[in-house]
Amino acid sequence: MIALNALVAICLSYVAFLFAVAFVAERAARRGQVGWLRSPLVYTLSLSIYCTAWTFYGAVGYAARSGLEYITIYLGPSLVMLGWWWLVRKMVRIGRTQRLTSIADLISSRFGKSNLLAIGVTILAVIGTTPYIALQLQSVTLSFDVFAQASGEAEQLPSAIWVAIGLALFTVVFGTRNLDVNERHHGVVMAIAVEAVVKLFALMAVGLFVVWGIGGGLGATLEKIDDSEIGAWQVEGGRWAGLMLLSAAAFLCLPRMFQVMVVENDDEAHLRTASWAFPTYLICMSLFVVPIAVVGLDLMPAGSNPDLFVLTIPLSQGREGLAILSFLGGFSSATSMVIVAAIALSTMVSNHIVMPIWLRFTNSGAVVSGDVRNVVLLARRLSIVGVVMLGYLYYRLSGGGNALAAIGLVSFTGVAQVLPVVLGGLFWRGATRIGAFAGLTLGFSVWLFTLFLPSVGTGVVISTTVMEQGFFGWSWLRPQALFGIEGLDPLMHTLFWSLALNTIAFFGFSLVSFPTPLERLQGAQFVNIFQHSSSVRSWSPGVAQSEDLMVMAQRILGAGEAQALFSRAARKQGVSGNLPEPTPGFLELLERELSGSVGAATAHAMIGQIVGGMSVSVQDLMAVADESAQLMEYSARLKEQSDELSRTARKLREANQKLTRISVQKDAFLSQISHELRTPMTSVRAFSEILRDSGQLTEAEQTKYASIIHDEAIRLTRLLDDLLDLSVLENGQVSLNLRHDMLRDLLDRAAAAALADDDGSALRLRRDRALEDIPIYTDPDRLTQVFINLISNSKKYCEAETPELHIRVGQRGDLLSLDFVDNGFGISPEAQDVIFEKFARVSDQKAGGAGLGLAICRQIMARLGGEITYLKGEGGAAFRIDLPTNITVAAQ
Amino acid sequence: MTDVTETTRTSVFLERQTYRRRRLVDAARLVPVLGLLLWLVPLLWPSEGDSRPAMSTAILYLFGVWIFLVVIKFLIARPLRSDPSDAQDGQE
């Protein structure tokens, strides 16, 4: 029998071999010879990280215990990969575009780069992965145990703590040798691919040996299977479908799967190959599980651990070589899982927890002295050790006696809590950070309470009382019978309640909360990734100092890498020297490079600090937009005011012009009035002087002169009366004496007054008295005054041989129109404009009045709510009077 | 859930070759649905009594479906290899 030391030596040399593989691959990658490193085959093989020691040892144990149920764990991922076009393609595209470093980064980025969410997912992932790592420790310890038992060296058995330390050390050395700009580990991926081949080869070898070496061929084995205790279909429907869903969810959400599937992906086209190649790998891995289980059950003594049949069958048949190969296969499965999981988790822990805290506490941000890389690396190494030790703790607490598959399923259910948020985030723009936080918290709590803590062992964390009577004695809070629904399979119970409550909370809180602008932007970017695979935000140029950026980049990326990046960018920009202009494009590129090392949120913050807070975040843009909206509103108000001002100015100008005009008019009026007053005054003075000075005047002469003086005085009085009248009318001081009257009566009175002193010069009035029978409510005296004026004007100025004035009456509703048309020559067109002005006289021949009559008429008509206009084209002089029959109605 | 990069880009009527490719993509998308349906068939099998199927039958059925799906996927993936709609527009 092989000695335990020899086995350890084999392990160590195997690890050394893996190191060599990783080293060669890294060196090749550095030289740029990445062709074969980036082949779809390597990608597919790296996906096989899904098959851990659980698959290698646990699947057989699972099959031995529960028949074909084990296969669901592989059917789910197969469906996911077969349906890569639906989901995985989108995840990979988003991961590449947004430079995501982990599943926590995915969720944090999607929901507005929320660091809180990233921390939450990180904690969930760490706790969720803990049982899984414990499972690997347990399997490696068990496999050592098998050999120790066989060689009788049980007392020298390396305890699980040594396995844990070894694995942690291994991972630290493997995974954090350098800080890769893209968070890609070519060496690790290559080593994993090799390990994938080793474990597949080992399991197939054992399977082939069992079927043809022991079972006696395919047909015989199938018969044996049917005869065995698991020989009939005995799968419970709920678990069958539930486990398929669970494994598919875990495949998408496990941190290590995200690492190899999205982060380490070099080319989206690899997915196409992986879509059929990975299910093929799974077929090969699970093909011989049932035969091995059946043969094991048949050959091995009752009570032996079925999880270890893969090892114990070859050993019991004396096939030590095969057993060692099998051991190496299991060792490969365990180590590769621990390495990738620890790397993925440490990335999350350092990017989302350590770096933000460190940046905050050092408070100097990116421009700190010393190398940030060291901090990041140290954080990762410590995280790796921490993660592995947590696994060890779980292993110790749970006693190491559980079936491997049961532990694995606990872990699966934990990480599957991320699924609703991921799916919602990728396909639903309405998903919000608060919703995601609520869903994750609730789902995680339910999982913790109903599955994780009980799985550690009854009485360790959750007491038996709580298990049986519920939390606080509330029977509806029993960990395995929530809401009093008993009899469910514990796993299905947790899966159902956690995912259901998670999803409900996620959707509910998303519906009622409102996302931040950045969240909405990222949501649109994620959901419509295939429409615009571009970067999200931009930096404002010109402010960032290239040297500072250089200093910071060197600390994070390493001097060589950073210098190469900068000079590449400088060349691209056409700038001489090694420092490119800090254009938005360059800043974005730099941020993406940095985010590969320290995570999106941290990189964003660091560049933001150097650029002097001049990063244009969406909030800033919104603020700017707000501000400019306010400015626009302000300027609109200003414009309004200035419009108003210019309107006022225009009005003032108009008023001024009017005043000037009026002043001119006033001057003209004064000179006219003096002229008008002087003429009669002159004759009064002259004749009164004659009367005074000459004593020999006859009686007749005296009378004549006195009557001239009298006439002139009357004319003066009339002129003054008219002026007074006009002034009163113009000032609006006139009070109207409103009465009901008949139009006919008014016209009668006017005709009588105007023609009273008729000297027979015979102005004949033509009226249609029937039409004039209109009741009217107005100031009859004033209106009569207008009529008199018009009639007497006609009498004075009509030059026809038989002067005739035609008064036509028309009525439209409440409006009355009166036309005064005579048969004279009318008024010359140039005079028509001025006849309504004061002192405007048509001719000087018959200077009967002062020229105020029509002006007064116009004023009166305005007061009465009507107007007087000159009618053109009527032959003779024609005036039209429009006025309302009821002045009060018109006023309204 | 349609691929927007394809539907927004081109006209309604396509060349025969493009049309074929589209239908291949459709088929590729439907493979997992078919797989899910076929793998849920075992839920219809009786799990009690003598009439429940033998383990070997179940194994042959499940693995048969599995291999069938992989082969279909493989056959579909080959002609789609040069699909321009998968151009790496997300790459820098």
Image (cartoon, helix red, strand yellow):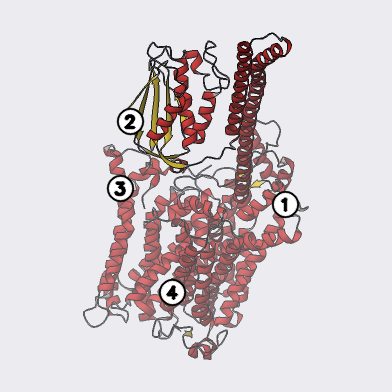
**Residue A409 makes an appearance in the image:** yes
Q: Position of residue A44 (x, y in %)?
A: 44, 55
Above/below status of A133 relative to A826: below
1 and 2 marks on the same chain:
yes
Q: Nearer the viewer, residue A351 or A191?
A: A351
Q: Nearer the viewer, residue A2 or A872?
A: A872
Query: Circle 2 is placed at which residue position?
Result: A769
Q: Of callouts 4 and 1, which one flags the residue occurring earlier in the amino acid sequence? A: 1
Q: Nearer the viewer, residue A680 or A143?
A: A680
What's the CA distance linking mark 2 and mark 4? 107 Å
Q: Position of residue A663 (x, y in %)?
A: 67, 24
Query: Circle 3 is placed at which residue position?
Result: B24
Residue drawn at x 51%, y 24% is: A854
Q: Of callouts 1 and 2, which one flags the residue occurring earlier in the amino acid sequence? A: 1
Query: Circle 1 is placed at which residue position?
Result: A366
Which disc number belongs to residue A544?
A: none
Q: Position of residue A881 (x, y in %)?
A: 43, 28
Q: Chain of mark 2?
A: A
